[in-house]
Amino acid sequence: MKLKKENILIVDDNYDMLELLQRHLKTFHFHTYKASSVSEAIEVLKSSKIDLIITDLQMPEINGIELIKYAEEHFPSIPKLVITGFPSVDTAINAVKSGAIDYLSKPFTRDELRKAIDNYLNNKQEIKSETIENQSNSENFSMGIVGNSEEHYQLIDVIKRVKDNRVTVLIEGESGTGKELIARAIHYQGLFANNPFITVNCGGIPETLLESELFGYVKGAFTGANETKKGLFHAAEGGTIFLDEIGNASLAVQSRLLRVLQEKEITMVGALIAEKIEVRIISATNSNLQNMIKNGTFREDLYYRLNVVNIETIPLRNRKADISPLLQTFIHKYEKEYNKSNITITPKALEILTRHYWPGNVRELENMVQRLIILCDHEIDVSLIPNQLKYKQPDDDFSLKPLSEIEKAYILKVLAAVHNNKTKAAEILQIDRKTLRQKLL
């Protein structure tokens, strides 16, 4: 190993582990920075030149995955090594997807640590070069949102207008239309880009836990609350919290969110005193909130508070001009992933893909391109495209069929696109599973 004084940031809430790592790194002739929390680590990153991050995953308040995501957004050229005492396949996948190069399981030896650091620092220059290229490509596509339609440029204009203030934004649209991508563009292209961006999937957290996850809780607030824990709103202080699938929030959580928007303060579960907080709220939903208001499952006053600026994502089928640039972007992306180059697409194949209805929107298109890149050698032609995409769309000859037949044909196409997942199909069609079954009879 070279005797160069590389700067390594080590992050762990366990003091003994920090000391052990620091001792090892000193014997390797590295200069170390220590942080016992994610917030401390972010301050170090902002003020110091760091060559490698080594972070634990399991930490109080904010976990190591959020630090990796933050560093990946703001310092993409810095390699990130995860250490964890709870190794699993899910842990590895989550860490790598968030931006980590790999992870090291506790307990590890001094030699294992040294070998891991050598690998990551040797690859740093290659990673940096690839990042610069990706950033350049992203700039050509207006903050990473790809398109060439009038709707695309209108969307970019709205993002530019709201990015530098803390106005509340509600993004509505079908699944797969890029709602989180829009939220990230608003945050990372604006004045608060150096502050946290916290994503909360309101549909992915059990209703009984969502309230405490968002607002935190004090020790003794409920059975199992053995210590005070800050919530995701604390983690987003000064930045943006993105509430995805806001329609799934319970009425109790909605009531608390209303207070956050009205009073700019939060109250931890079990606490008596409210705390002032400065956070921009961006929400997203593929549900019809107006119908939910009529049904009494969503608060009307909260809706108008969330909906100061409304962004409605347009389904891909209604912006055909975006399909070609999206195709080229995804082809370029998966060429790199699967070590291929100079992939072309025939005019007929492009015509079929442009004609397709894309019920799963951009997400479905990306998955299709990934499949085609895997199957092709140097050219994507009609023979590689699945048969269901080659058939006429349900609305091609709508005037010649009863409405029920057109509807059923479309539902079957949606089911085919989501591999017969009826729950997902019902979500895309914005109907319940019972209605879906009835329409297929």
Image: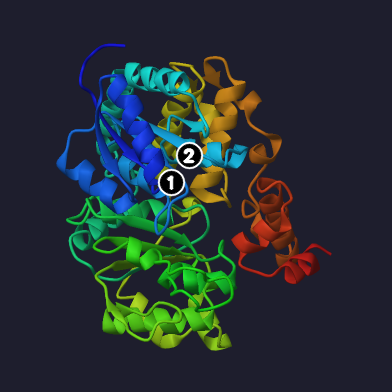
CA neighbours of label 2 inside 10 A, class few (<14), some (14 to 19), many (20+) = many
**Residue tagged 1:** 65
User: Against 81, is 85 above or below?
Assistant: below
Q: CA distance from mark 1 to mark 2?
A: 6 Å
Answer with left or right where residue 321 lies relative to residue 403: left
Q: Where's residue 135, x and y in %?
A: 27, 33
Answer with left or right where residue 198 lies relative to residue 316: left
User: Against 222, is 78 above or below?
Assistant: above
The quadrant the C terminus occupies is bottom right
Checking the image for residue 139, the label placed there is none
Q: Toward which corner of the image does residue 19 lie, by quadrant?
A: top left
Asked whether disc 1 touches disc 2, contact meaning CB atoms under 8 Å apart, the reply is yes
Q: Where's residue 18, x and y in %?
A: 36, 39
Checking the image for residue 95, the label placed there is 2
Q: Nearer the viewer, residue 409 or 243?
A: 243
Tell me the kind of residue under disc 1.
Answer: Ile
Res. 105 visible in picture: yes
Label 1: state its secondary structure.
helix
